[in-house]
Image (cartoon, grey):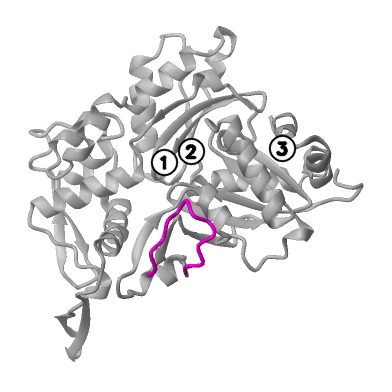
């Protein structure tokens, strides 16, 4: 308990694709925005003394500006730049901050030092993503499959603690799938026009004409960001995990699914609906996507979801393996993919030991899956029994930053 008083908390989940922030005790975050920033000035993400103006959030990034570059920013840099917590009276709030299950001691200490020194908060708690997801589902022990934007992480949680030695990760995440879909569509002659590059005029009732706009000062990074936003929506709307491993011949005559692009053009998507999601199970499929040459080496060394899950469980104590097999939790935006739960459970049943009772669990609500880490933090930080767990500013000043390892195990 901080100074004998209860601490009101702000819960922050800094994901590789999306940042979520809000007040503890609420059902959903107040703010959700992309983990990228725009800048029209020369910017060095490692130089936090820079005074360049940043554009943060979907609305600010949705407005095209001449010479604006778009940067992916790691959570630590977002905090250092003050882009996330500006405008909040933080001296009255504790900060519950999620962190990757694989975060190093040095990263944790740097984050704690930054939070106390830059924002002068009264208390802090760093919580592992997998623990918060498990907590949100009401389980103390589970195998958390977190499908994020930048990567996929599988972490076993036992009695509320991550078993670090068994954490497995893969560079195959939602953003890579989006890029694969974008490149595959381009190879078929489908060019996605960013929203800023045209305007639609109604020339008669119900009839629209698309007029291209000249935007010569648009940067390549902003053009690609704008295209990815549309490609990501296509992926979420039409893609689904195939029931069986993807095979080119089996899916060559699959019925097409229409999708209307922002410029009014309707495209038909066939085998890609199944091929792109199956990359999560068979990363080598990246090699078959035109234009993805830079990722071939990464994909060839990555493992599929079932293999990662079984390897992770096998690194755990024999006594808890059965419980982990029966409590596999899907979390993250990529986990919302249609039929992903059913396909993962099917593959695991085929590849796991006969005695294992495989059960893959996922909330029926896509929002809860996408925000499971934040929801777990919101519940945890609002509990009265949690108050004595905070790493307080006075403890930081008395014991130093290394004390975070003891207070936030």
Q: Are marks 2 and 1 in contact (CB under 8 Å)?
A: yes
Magenta extent: 40-52
Q: Is residue 376 visible?
A: no
Q: Nearer the viewer, residue 181 or 237?
A: 181
Q: Nearer the viewer, residue 183 or 107?
A: 107
Q: For marks 2 and 1, give the CA distance.
A: 8 Å
- Residue at 36 percent of width and 28 percent of height: 305
Q: Position of residue 263 (x, y in %)?
A: 20, 73
Question: SS for tag 1?
Answer: helix
The 10 Å Cα crowd at callout 2, few under 14, some 14 to 19, many 20 or more, is: some
Q: Earlier in the sequence, mark 1 or mark 3?
A: 1
- The prevailing secondary structure element of the residues shown in magenta is loop
Tell me: 237 left or right of 333: left
Q: Earlier in the sequence, mark 2 or mark 1?
A: 1
Report the label total.
3
- Disc 2 marks which residue? 362
Question: SS for tag 3?
Answer: helix
User: Which mark is drawn over residue 335?
Assistant: 1
Q: Nearer the viewer, residue 154 or 251?
A: 154
Where residue 276 sits, quadrant-wise, is: top left
Q: Position of residue 193 (x, y in %)?
A: 19, 67
- Residue at 74 percent of width and 55 percent of height: 120
Pick the quarter of the image with the C terminus: top right
Q: Nearer the viewer, residue 305 or 215?
A: 215
Q: Are marks 1 and 3 in contact (CB under 8 Å)?
A: no
- Disc 3 marks which residue? 401
């Amino acid at each position: 308990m901080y100074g004998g008083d209860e601490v009101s908390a702000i819960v922050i989940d800094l994901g590789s694709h999306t940042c979520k922030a809000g007040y503890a005790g609420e059902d959903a975050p107040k703010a959700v925005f992309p983990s990228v920033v725009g800048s029209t000035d020369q910017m060095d993400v490692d130089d936090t003394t820079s005074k360049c103006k940043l554009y943060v959030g979907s609305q600010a990034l949705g407005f095209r500006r001449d010479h604006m570059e778009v940067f992916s920013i790691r959570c630590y840099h977002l905090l250092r730049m003050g882009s996330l917590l500006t405008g909040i009276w933080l001296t009255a709030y504790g900060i519950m901050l999620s962190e990757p299950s694989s975060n190093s001691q040095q990263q944790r200490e740097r984050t704690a030092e930054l939070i106390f020194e830059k924002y002068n908060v009264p208390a802090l708690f760093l919580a592992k993503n997998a623990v918060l997801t498990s907590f949100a589902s009401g389980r103390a022990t589970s195998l958390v499959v977190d499908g994020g934007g930048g990567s996929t992480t599988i972490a076993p949680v036992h009695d509320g603690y991550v078993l670090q030695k068994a954490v497995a990760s893969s560079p195959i995440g939602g953003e890579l799938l989006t890029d694969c879909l974008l490149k595959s569509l381009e190879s078929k002659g489908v060019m996605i026009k960013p929203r800023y590059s045209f305007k639609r005029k109604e020339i008669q009732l119900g009839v629209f004409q698309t007029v291209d706009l000249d935007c010569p000062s648009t940067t390549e990074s902003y053009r690609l960001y704008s295209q990815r936003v549309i490609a990501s929506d296509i992926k979420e709307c039409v893609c689904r995990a195939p029931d069986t491993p993807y095979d080119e011949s089996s899916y060559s005559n699959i019925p097409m699914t229409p999708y209307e692009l922002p410029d009014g053009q309707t495209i038909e998507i066939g085998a890609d609906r199944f091929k792109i999601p199956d990359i999560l199970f068979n990363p080598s499929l990246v090699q078959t996507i035109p234009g993805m040459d830079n990722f071939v080496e990464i994909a060839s060394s990555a493992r599929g979801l079932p293999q990662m899950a079984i390897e992770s469980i096998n690194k755990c104590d024999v006594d808890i393996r059965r419980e982990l097999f029966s409590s596999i939790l899907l979390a993250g935006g990529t986990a919302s993919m249609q039929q992903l739960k059913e396909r993962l459970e099917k593959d695991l049943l085929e590849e796991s030991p006969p005695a294992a009772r495989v059960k893959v669990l996922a909330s029926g609500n896509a929002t809860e899956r996408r925000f499971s880490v934040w929801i777990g933090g919101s519940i945890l930080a609002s509990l009265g029994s949690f108050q004595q767990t905070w790493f307080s500013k006075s403890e930081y000043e008395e014991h130093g930053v290394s004390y975070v390892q003891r207070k936030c195990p």
